[in-house]
Amino acid sequence: MRTCNCSGLVARAAAFVLLACAAVAQAADRIDQEHQVKAAFIANFIKFIDWPSLGDPGSKFVVGVYGADAFEHTIDDALAGRSVSGHPIVVQQLHSDGEMKKCRVVVSGASSEDRIERLSRICTNSGTVLIGESDDFVKYGGTIRFLLVYSQVRFDVNLDAAKRSGVTISSKLLQLAHEVYREGNP
């Protein structure tokens, strides 16, 4: 007759669950730290971009988060209390393409070629910098793409997209870029 050592099995299962929970917590912390680093980059990008007219003195400099919800709170924290040439920076969650036109920066979760190209067209002549993370984000018209290189956050820049939107990116920022793209010549 076989006997079952159920307490040993339960203990091993509990240990496995605890290890899995710890791994998930570490991954969540790593992702949160990554978003904090990216939010700090965004705060610094703003300083190294020449913006077209910012409007009336004191008007808001809007940073929109569109389909990249995990970023919203870290971006909000990184930009809290900051301003650009006397324009207070505010972070807003966007719910439609049309809302992008009131933004100077849009952080997008778009990943498909069609979607990125559509958002890029909306940014044309608007003074809006489109930032994302998908692999081909700058290739399909995004202005700045975040990527990880050996576990470090880096960024690529699409100069043609910046020009189309009406902004000029400082050469100091371009020197720090992982890659600088011109469409048709990655």
Image (cartoon, rainbow, N blue to C red):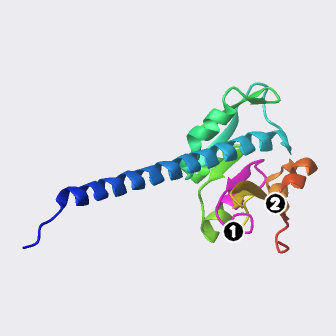
Magenta span has 169?
Answer: no
What residue did someone put label 1 on? 136
Of 78 and 121, the residue lying toward us = 78
Q: Residue at x 11, y 72 (%)?
A: 2
Disc number placed over residue 8 in the picture, else none: none
Q: Residue at x 74, y 48 (%)?
A: 128
Q: Nearer the viewer, mark 1 or mark 2?
A: 2
Q: Is residue 62 left or right of residue 176?
A: left
Q: Is residue 47 left or right of residue 141?
A: right
Residue 181 location, x and y as percent?
83, 65
Residue 158 location, x and y as percent?
81, 61
For the question of whether residue 129 can be seen, the reply is: yes
Q: Residues within 10 Å of mark 1 (few under 14, many from 20)?
A: some
For the question of whether residue 95 can be seen, the reply is: no
Magenta span has 129?
Answer: yes
Q: CA distance from mark 1 to mark 2?
A: 14 Å
- Under circle 2, the secondary element is loop
| Magenta segment boundaries in residue numbering | 119-139
Q: Residue at x 85, y 67 (%)?
A: 182
